[in-house]
Amino acid sequence: MKTIQAFITEDGRLFQFEKEAQRHEVELYKHAIIDEFLSSPENPYTSIPQKGISRQSIISWELWKKNNDK
């Protein structure tokens, strides 16, 4: 038998890596506001692939701010 380290998010999902768990939690907590921005006229990227890239960039930005005390 082998002991493993895992990370459980607020919604009960299990992740092998802490960064994946952190990213998932940012998505959980910021989902509504990110979607609101992506659907607003302020977002110039309206195609589905561009919105996906924008979503990932916003989540990465939020993680960077959190991990760098910004």
Image (cartoon, grey):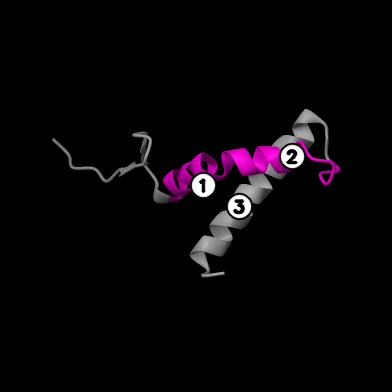
| Residue 38 numbered mark, or none | 2
Secondary structure category for the residue under label 2: helix
* Amino acid type indicated by mark 2: Leu
Instruction: Write the residue at 58% across / 39% down.
Output: 31
In this figure, what is the number of numbered marks? 3
Q: Is residue 24 magenta?
A: yes
Residue at x 24%, y 43% (from the top left corner): 4
Circle 1 residues within 10 Å: few <14, some 14–19, many ≥20: some
Q: Earlier in the sequence, mark 1 or mark 2?
A: 1
Residue 7 vs residue 27: left or right?
Answer: left
Q: Quadrant of residue 62?
A: bottom right
Q: Are marks 2 and 3 in contact (CB under 8 Å)?
A: no
Q: Quadrant of residue 39?
A: top right
Earlier sequence position, callout 2 versus callout 3: 2
Q: Which residue is mark 1?
A: 26
Q: Quadrant of the C terminus?
A: bottom right
Q: Are marks 1 and 3 in contact (CB under 8 Å)?
A: no
Give percent across and percent down for residue 46. 83, 34
SS for callout 1: helix
Q: Which residue is mark 3?
A: 60
Q: Nearer the viewer, mark 2 or mark 3?
A: 2
Image side of residue 34 versus residue 2, left or right: right
Nearest to the observer: residue 19 or residue 41 = 41
Secondary structure that dominates the magenta span: helix
Residue pushed farthest top?
48
Number of residues whose C-alpha sits closer than 10 Å to that of mark 2, classed few (under 14), some (14–19) or many (20 or more) = some
The disc, 1 or 3, on the residue closer to the chain's N-terminal end is 1
Picture layout, residue 67 above or below residue 1: below
Which stretch did the figure color magenta? 19-44
Q: CA distance from mark 1 to mark 3?
A: 9 Å
| 3D distance between C-alphas at marks 1 and 2 | 16 Å
**The N terminus lies in quadrant:** top left
